[in-house]
Amino acid sequence: MAETTAELFELAVRTHSRRLLAIARAIVGNRASPEDIVQQAVLNLYEHRDRYDWREPGGLMRRTVVNEALRVLRAPRMSVVAEDHPGRSSTPMTGMMEDETVATVRKAIEQLPEHFRAALILCEYENMSYVQIAEILNASVPQVKTWLHRGRRQLAERLKGFMEEKRKTDAIEK
Amino acid sequence: MNAVSDNDLELLESYLDEALPRAEAAELRHRMAADAALASAMTELRHERALCQKLWEANDPDDQAADRLIANIHSSIRKHELRRFATRSVRYGSAVAACLGIAILAGVLWHGRTPDSAKPQASAKILYQVSLVDDSGNVVAKQSFDSLEQARKLSDGLNRWQEHQERVRSGAVTPAGGDQF
C-alpha cells in the first residue's frame, strides 16, 4: 500500500489523469492544449505536494485543472490547437452522425462564458453537487445555480435549430 | 418551453441534477403529472442533456492519450527536478564563493597587509644595478636603474673617470681646469 507523499502522488496521477484530461478538453475545447493544462496543473500540485493530503486527491486535482483551464482561457493570446479532438465512432455512418452532433454541441458549449461552461461540465460530466462546484469555482451555491441555469438556457437557444432538425430526421427514420 | 416559467425551468434542472430535497422533488413529479407543458419541458431538458452527454463521451480520452499524458507529466516533473537541482547548486556555489571571498578579505584586513602576490612590486621596477667598488674590492655604493642603457651610461662614465684619474696620477695627463670627461 502506498504511504509516502511521493507514492500517493504517483498513484493520484495514474488514477485521475484520464478524467482530468476529459475535464480540460471539455472546458478549453480547441482554444488551448488540454494536455498542457493538465500537465501544468499537476506540476503545480507537485511543487507544493507536501501541503496536501493525497489520500483523497480527486477534488483537489479537479479544482486545480479547472482553475488552470480558466486561467489559460483568460490569457490574452489564444490559438486553435486542433480542428477537433479524437472522438470515438463505431461505424462510419453512425460515426459521421455522432461526429456532427458532437461538433455542434461542442461549438455551442464553446460559445458559453467560461464559468457557465465549467459549471456545466462539473455538474453534468462530473456529476458534482452544487456545493462541490461552488467550492471548485470559488463561488457561492446560488451563483453556481445561476451560472448553470443561464448556461443551459443559452445552450438550448444555440442548439434549438439543430435539435428540431434532428427530431425531424429521427421521425423520418422511424 | 415558453409556457414554463423561468423558475420552473430552474426547478426542473435542479430535479435532473438531483439537487432537490425529497419533498420538493415529489411535489414536482405531481405537478408534472398534471401539467403537460411542465412535462414537455422536462422531456426537452432531458433531450438537451442527452446531446451534451454525447460530447462528454467523445471527450473521454483513449488509453493511448492517457498514457501519453502520464508520460509527459513524469517527464515534466523530471525536468522540474533537474532545474531545481541546478538552481540549488548554483546558489550553494555562489554562497561558498562569497564566503571564501569574505574570509580572504577579512584575513587581509586583519593582518593589515595584502598577500604577496597582490603587493605592488616597487622593487620589480629596479632591474639593473651598478655597484661602486673601492680599491680593496668592497662595495661602497649601489645605484639602481630602470633600464640597461642608463646603467651602462653610468658604468661607462665611471670607467672613463677612473682611466682619466689613472692617467693624471701617472703624469701622462695634466688637468687643465678640473675633471673632464
Image: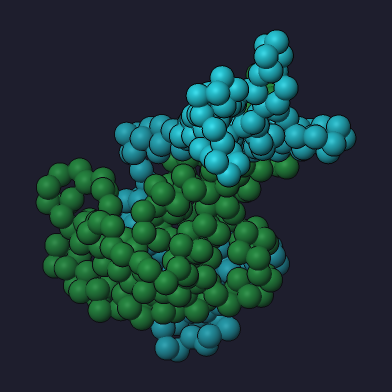
Residue B141 horizontal/vertical position (percent): 70, 26
A170 lies left or right of A60: left
Q: Is residue B138 left or right of residue A6?
A: right
The residue lying at 55 percent from left, 41 percent from top is B176
Q: Would residue A152 be seen by someone viewing this image from the given angle? A: no
Q: Nearer the viewer, residue B123 or A50?
A: B123
The residue shown at (44%, 79%) is A153
Q: In the image, residue A95 lies at what x, y percent?
A: 18, 50
- Asked if residue A144 is positioned above or below residue A45 in the image, the reply reads below
- Residue at screen point 53% across, 49% down: A41
* Front residue of this view, candidates B114 and A58: B114
Q: In the image, B14: left or right of B43?
A: right
- Judge left or right: residue B179 versus residue A78: right
| Residue A173 coordinates in the image, percent (x, y) | 14, 62
Residue B76 seen from this side: yes
Residue pictured at 33% horizontal, 71% vertical: A108
Quarter location, residue A79: bottom left
Q: Colour of chain B?
A: cyan
The green one among the chains is A
